[in-house]
Amino acid sequence: MKIAHVTTIDMALHLLLLNQLKSLQQAGFEVVGISAAGPDVAAVEAAGIRHIAVPMTRSFTPAADLVALKNLYDVMRRERFTIVHTHTPKPGLLGQMAARMAGGPIVGNTLHGFYFYDHMPKF
């Protein structure tokens, strides 16, 4: 079984998810981390987790987001993951869309943190 975990930046793969990725790999799954490239990729790869770089930004960038969606779709079509698990807001949208468009059989998302709260400005 081939599992992808998708985050916007490599730091999330390293600091938030690395233990989970290693546990899945030790259980016999093929595990791949997908995020924008950055300095934390080395730690992910040193742990034996394959990384695929897909440029993404954390801010709202419509043109770049369309490019990221296309790149994610290309990765999903090529890799044929059994499970695509997205994390963080941008992959929660773009990663799930790309996985569904590519025919991924199991697609899920985990919300980390609470994005909206009672006293938040309306905008």
Image (spheres, grey):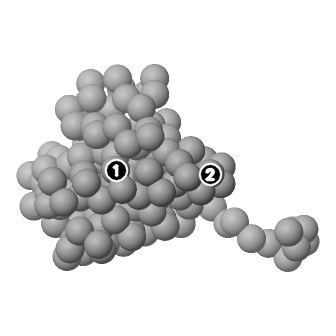
Secondary structure at badge 2 equals loop
Q: Quadrant of the C terminus?
A: bottom right
Which residue shows up at 23% across the image and 37% down it?
Answer: 49
**3 shown above or below 49:** below
Seen from the viewer's position, the closer of residues 48 and 95 is 95
Mark 2 lies on residue = 61
Q: Residue 114 at x, y = what percent? A: 67, 66
Seen from the viewer's position, the closer of residues 50 and 46 is 50
Callout 2, which amino acid?
Thr
State left or right for residue 28 relative to residue 89. left
Task: Find residue 72 and report its image quarter.
Answer: bottom left
Rounded to the nearest whole Å, what is the CA distance between mark 2 and mark 1? 15 Å
Which residue shows up at 20% across the image and 74% down it?
Answer: 103
State left or right for residue 31 relative to residue 115. left
Callout 1, which amino acid?
Asn
Mark 1 lies on residue = 71
